[in-house]
Amino acid sequence: MVTRLRPWIAAALALAIVGLGHAYLRRWGRALLWLVTVVGASIALHSVANVAPVNPITNPEGVPSVVLLPITALVVLSAIDAFVLGKRDRDRARTATVGRGGMNGQSGSSHADRRSGDTAATTGTERPPTRNAVPAAPEEMPAVTCPHCGKETDAELDFCHWCTEPLPAAEENAVDGVERGS
């Protein structure tokens, strides 16, 4: 329920106090940016209009329209921005939940199938791998020990990636400074 109302809550908070709606959405930089923009515009407009700053809550008729209209427009734009961000966050959370099979039913495979890694029974709605997922290693290449540093290195390389010295196999394949293809 709160997730559904999140954009509206953010917009209402942004109308009440500039930047509060963005802070509710945990967009700290944007909250500070809107606050500085509205306060800075208010100071600039008061100095240009040559009017002493007044509290618009206690004395609303004391604020000239040259200052009141632009500040009101900025506050409304801040609220619209908070609403749009809240709606975008809500939609992203909803699609992420649906993509994992959490909102509208099953994902096409049982929990035991997903846990064991059996993907034959899936329907293509499985969650994609995360950024930090380690890809499955293709065929294991035999490791070669470097004669210079003694550490294991990749057999496909012509040099040791630890000490950058050429490997003996690479030196044998080289003829007159040109390497042969394997």
Image: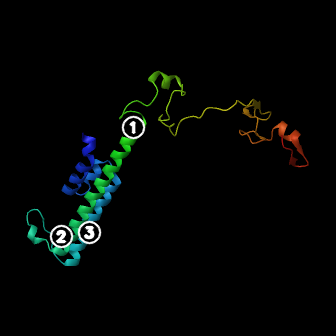
- Would you say the residues marked 3 and 2 are in contact, meaning their CB atoms lie under 8 Å apart? no
Which residue is under mark 2?
A: 68
Q: Amino acid at mark 2?
A: Leu
* Disc sitting over residue 41 in the figure: 3
Which residue is under mark 1?
A: 98
Q: Which residue sits at x=45%, y=29%?
A: 108
SS at mark 3? helix
Q: Earlier in the sequence, mark 3 or mark 1?
A: 3
Q: Which residue sits at x=28%, y=53%?
A: 83
Foreground residue among 97 and 66 = 97
Residue 121 appears at what percent x and percent y? 51, 27
Which class describes the residues within 10 Å of circle 3: few (<14), some (14-19), or many (20+)?
some
Q: Which residue sits at x=39%, y=42%?
A: 95
Residue 14 appears at what percent x and percent y? 23, 55
Which class describes the residues within 10 Å of circle 2: few (<14), some (14-19), or many (20+)?
some
- Of the 4 image quadrants, the one containing the N terminus is top left
- The quadrant holding residue 136 is top right
Q: Amino acid at mark 1?
A: Val
- Would you say the residues marked 3 and 1 are in contact, meaning their CB atoms lie under 8 Å apart? no
- The quadrant holding residue 48 is bottom left
Which class describes the residues within 10 Å of circle 1: few (<14), some (14-19), or many (20+)?
some
Look at the picture and state if 10 lies above or below 35.
Answer: above
Q: Amino acid at mark 3?
A: Ala
For discs 3 and 2, the disc positioned in front in the rendered view: 2
Residue 141 appears at what percent x and percent y? 73, 31
Q: Earlier in the sequence, mark 2 or mark 1?
A: 2
